[in-house]
Amino acid sequence: MITFPNAKINLGLDIVEKRPDGYHNLETVFYPIPLCDILEITPVTKPDAPDYTFTMYNAVFEGSNDDNLVIKAYKALAADHKLPKVEISLYKHIPTGAGLGGGSADAAFALKMLNEIAGLGLTAGELRGYASRIGADCAFFIDNTPAYATGIGDILEPTVCSISGHYLVLVKPEVHISTKDAYSLVTPQKPQEPLTEIAQRPIHEWKDAMKNDFEKSIFAKHPDMKKVKEELYSLGAVYASMSGSGSSFFGIFKEEQDIEKIKTLFPGMFCWCKKI
């Protein structure tokens, strides 16, 4: 079985307050986009085969394969259900460390695939339960529709917003942003207007109302990243922002963009453009 786990972007992100457990409550809007990895899971019938094998292509995973979120998804289900032995292959196209949720998407899609392959009959709600144990934004990819996220990103509510008909440009600088450091530099503050309400406004109003709280501190530490956002606006973006804690940026455009021109403007960076 082959499937195509897709990325997401954060339409704004507010850090609301620090929690007693050291984490932060936030509010954001997760929006799925058609930038996809390729995930294949094949049942194995050889009796002496291991429970699973895992191979990843087009990316280097630092650490043991057992730490990969896809394998964590397999083990989470295997702890409660009988799963077949499988071979898992993952081709990465979604950049890692980009704020695009690629690893979480891979894990969520693995849960859905294993549920089907093993005939477990788990509901979407039950799959979301497993996903939430793997990563804060992992459950989003079970339903994979625009969602207003609160808590640590794990409390999801459907939201009505759309960038359909627009062109989306992604740019990822070769900068690693530590999520821990990103949070440590932000002063939490409750927003005056819920982000889900802002996201339902016309897109041309987002620039003056929607923000990503991580940008201020990250731009101070990495000034070149601010230039990426400014360049997207200079190209005519209706709205541009960093996604999550970075390091990728997206721009929403009314007109089709020349990807070769984009690559020239952002040499050495991952660039992607697609009509949504």
Image (cartoon, rainbow, N blue to C red):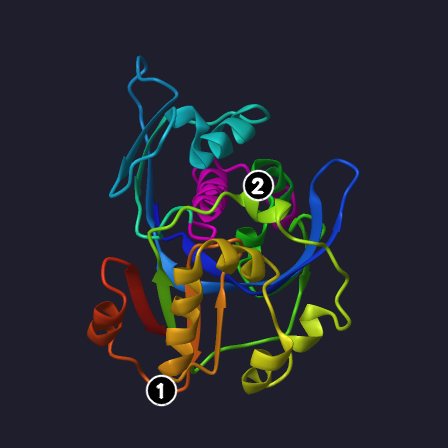
Q: Residue furthest top?
A: 48
What residue span does the magenta drawing correspond to? 98-127
Q: Secondary structure at mark 1?
A: loop
Q: Quadrant of residue 184?
A: top right
Judge whether residue 60 is colored magenta.
no
Picture quarter with the N terminus: top left
**Could you tell me residue 275's position as x and y percent?**
36, 76
Instruction: Name the residue located 75 percent from the left edge and 67 percent from the top edge.
Output: 191
**Nearer-N-terminus badge (2/1):** 2
Q: Which residue is mark 2?
A: 180
Q: Residue at x 35, y 87 (%)?
A: 255
206 with respect to 49 (left or right):
right
Q: Residues within 10 Å of mark 2 (few under 14, many from 20)?
A: few
- Nearer the observer, disc 2 or disc 1? 2
Residue situated in front as seen by the camera: 232 or 144: 232
Secondary structure category for the residue under label 2: helix
Residue 63 - label:
none
As displayed, is residue 178 above or below residue 204? Answer: above
Work out whether residue 160 or residue 13 is closer to the camera in this orientation and state it.
13
Mark 1, residue position: 255
The amino acid type found where label 2 is placed reads Lys
**Can you see residue 276?**
no
Q: Are there few (<14), some (14-19), or many (20+) residues within 10 Å of tag 1?
A: some
Q: Quadrant of the C terminus?
A: bottom left
Report x, y in % for residue 58.
Answer: 24, 43
Count the marks.
2
Q: Residue at x 67, y 76 (%)?
A: 198
